[in-house]
Image (tube, rainbow, N blue to C red):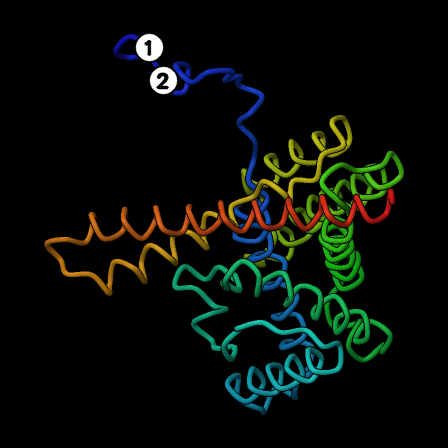
Amino acid sequence: MPPAGICPLVGLRNFHPSLIRWCLMHVVHLGLLFVCNGSGLNLLLRCGYFGRDDVSMAIKLSRAFVAFKAWMSANKVECSQPPFTEKMLFKKNSDILLTSKAYNGRVVVQWLSHEVHLASTSPTFSAYDPRFFVIVAALRRMARFLCGLERAGRYLTPEESESIFEDGYAFLKHYKCLTLMSLRLGMQEWFMKPKCHALWHLLVGIRDKRSNPRFFHGFVDEDAMAWIKSTYLKAHPTRAIRWIMRCGKLRIWASHLKIKKFNRHVALRLARKRG
């Protein structure tokens, strides 16, 4: 163990600072997507895409959610996104952020990139906001960036890393432009956040190391926390910790048996191919 006052990670065997990486989920899905989705949905609501000004905001949001569900059905996509509400979009400090779960935000940005692009083809809607086409470009670049990461494997080819980097870098340039335009218009959208800098570090890692950050982000940790919570609620309060440790050991042992079975299956298939 390292001396007192020193980070415990230093005491781990083979530890190196390069092993500490930015989490794609917390940087993008639970950060920048709140800004993108909030601005995109607010743009469609204000320009009249889901109803004119005499229609209440609740009805517009209900129509937007119906369109979102129809898009998911047509594209065979599933997520647990609840109906859109005003509290979900408009915050008490007047910020416009569409908060959602990490995966749900990923699906919403894909839908919004499609809907905002359709709205931009109509002069009636696109003339409403001078930022319209820049927002379209930013949403489409972010959607392409996430799609590229999901299609690629753990290690990227030079072409994949270059394409994904270009999409992410173009998104950051559009984000910066939208920040300046929003400030001039007095809109509390697209504010510059520290997570923009964190995204740049992720992009540099994609370009230089050609590793896919989707394979080491925090989605696995979130699944583990959900399991711990459900296990804790089933246990007696006085024996909850012991119950979690016991169930955890059983899960590890079950995973060990599954891996051994899988390895035997792979070995048999290889033997058949060689024979």
Tell me residue 224's x, y (percent): 42, 51
Q: Callout 1 environment at 10 Å: few (<14), some (14 to 19), or many (20+)?
A: few
* Residue drawn at 80 percent across, 72 percent down: 126
Do tag 1 and tag 2 residues touch (Cβ < 8 Å)? Answer: yes
Quadrant location, the N terminus:
top left
Q: Residue furthest top?
A: 3
Out of 158 and 171, give the one closest to the viewer: 158
Figure check: 118 above or below 52: above
Distance (Cα) linking label 1 and label 2: 8 Å
Task: Determine which quarter of the picture holds residue 193.
Answer: top right
Q: For mark 2, does the 10 Å Cα neighbourhood hold few (<14), some (14 to 19), or many (20 or more) residues?
A: few
- Residue in the picture at 13% in, 58% down: 237
Looking at the picture, tell me which residue is in the foreground, 26 or 128: 26
For label 1, the residue is 2
Task: Give amino acid for label 2.
Answer: Cys
Q: Which residue is mark 2?
A: 7
| Vertical comparison of 166 with 19: above or below | below
Q: Position of residue 42 (x, y in %)?
A: 61, 70
Residue at point 66% right, 66% down?
40
Q: Quadrant of the C terminus?
A: top right
Task: Point out the frontmost of discs 1 and 2.
Answer: 1
Q: Quadrant of residue 33?
A: bottom right
| Closer-to-camera residue (63/227) | 227
Quadrant assignment, res 155: top right
Residue 4 as seen in the image, left or right of residue 78: left
Disc 1, SS? loop
Q: Earlier in the sequence, mark 1 or mark 2?
A: 1
The amino acid sitting under disc 1 is: Pro
